Amino acid sequence: MGNAMNACRSCWSINLGLLILLSSAGAHAALDCGQLPAPDPGKNFFSNFLNNCYAIPLALGDGVVVAGDTNALYDVLYYRVDPRYEVVFVGAFPNARSMSVAVYDDHEATLHWLTDYQIVPMSPSFVNPYQPGVAFVPDQRYAVVVGLGGVQPLPDAVTPGCRLDMFNVHVNSLDASMRHTGLSWDGDPGIPAWFPPHETGANTAGAILFRRYLYQSAASPLAKPIALLRDLTTGCAVPATEATQVLQQVTADRRIYTTWVHRDQEDAHWYYVNQVLPRMCYGVDPDSYLLWLRGAEYLPGTNPDAVYLAGQFKLPVAPPPDWFMRIRLRLPRMPQIPCLGCTLDGTEELRYWSVSFQNKNFTIASFSDRDVVVDAEGFATIIIGLGTPAPSHLTPENGYTYFDLTQYTDWNKVTALNIRSILRSPGFRCSSGELSPRTGEYNSLGGFMGEYSPAVDFLTSTQIPPVAEPYRRPDSCEQTPPEAPVPCTAFYGGGTP
């Protein structure tokens, strides 16, 4: 996700838009960070500290090395818990399909999070574009606070010029002081002897991660949020150099962060959900080469708004000539944002959907719902190129989405397909969220997702119909199969290459 920027006497450069005051128009020149004045008592917290000497940049990741989505941006800051401080983030709602902020603990497990529509704008003059019927407007600001176990100072104890109470800030609060609950292996007779006891209680460190999916443009210099470390004894911000280098309270350098987290706990979590807990299946789908499983309950840094449906996958060393992979399913109804003048209408079944081709902890390629051609009912036929030129009839007009996997480095090293579904509507009954963790989707009635379950097979160019045909399945959503799940003994179903 990148390394921390080295602060110096003149500080690192920040877009001048970052210096725009919230209380007045205009911008200051870059300050000399070695000669910082006392806070101006006639100004507020942001007017005094939203500048190049106090603002701490977040590291930026593109979803590749974190096994994420290459259509997403990941902005991260790492923290250590100390009740003397809190971290204040300032941002502008991005022109994106969705955004969120999540806090993780020293096990890299999810603590708390805020989804875009839950974030209250910084003042009544700003709007949240993730509310139904609200169109995107540039530079609509918000603030989010991550508490580290401290108590807010009394108003009289706040240094003049450091007040925050005139803004909507602490209404968007996340607590990082205590570790996650649940996800424990204590008492399970199946754990190996080397397992440490599961830690509970006070947290010591973690990560704060902002996500942006289908981000369209830099409509504001704060679309990528920045952080301010606030000293709760005075209410004022700590200079960035002091926060990152002297106190080492926060950092954007993952190499430093890896010395803060409890790696033995993370390793035990990972081993427990992937090696001790069984994969459960109801049966093998005869129409799909992949056996689709919902992801494990624990995943380091997982998106708490997402449900993951994964299938293990392996290509032959030399794929046969004239060979294509086909994915057929029905997609839920999703919004068009980000786009000019369009809005959420509140009736969407899902906010976002994507497929990532992965190799262990790396993402090789991704495509999203925006790349997929669907018919009037939402049916899609996606053809994956594996080295053979696409036949001429694989066009959107004929109902096809063509994705040439060979255009990506290491395309032939794919080991899994990961389907990501974000923010399903409570009324949408065919989501992968209906599955239990590490449980197969298919059952004797047709599957928990019905027509929304992806069927994967392989075929030659001459076997691809001239026009895509909807792949219809029984409407088996929400139906309870007569059989009970059993531990999986296979990773692949039908549709064998």
Image (spheres, rainbow, N blue to C red):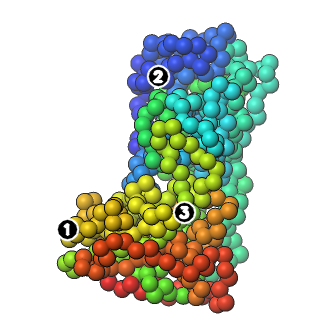
| Mark 2 residue element | helix
Query: Residue 266: x, y in percent?
Result: 55, 61
Quadrant hosting residue 238: top right
Closer to the camera, 167 or 288?
288
From the viewer's perspective, is residue 490 above or below residue 185? below
Q: Is residue 497 visible?
A: yes
Residue type highlighted by circle 2: Gly
Circle 2 packing at 10 Å, graded few (<14), some (14-19), many (20+), is some
Q: Residue at x 34, y 61 (%)?
A: 396
Residue under pointer 3: 332
Evaluate whether residue 402 shows in this view: no
Callout 3: helix, strand or loop? loop
Identified by mark 3, the residue type is: Pro
Mark 2 or mark 1: whose residue is earlier in sequence: 2
| Amino acid type, residue under disc 1 in the picture | Pro
Residue occupied by mark 2 = 17
Please give the residue where the numbered disc 1 appears in the rendered image.
389
Residue 86's quadrant in the figure?
Answer: top right
Q: Is residue 393 left or right of residue 482?
A: left
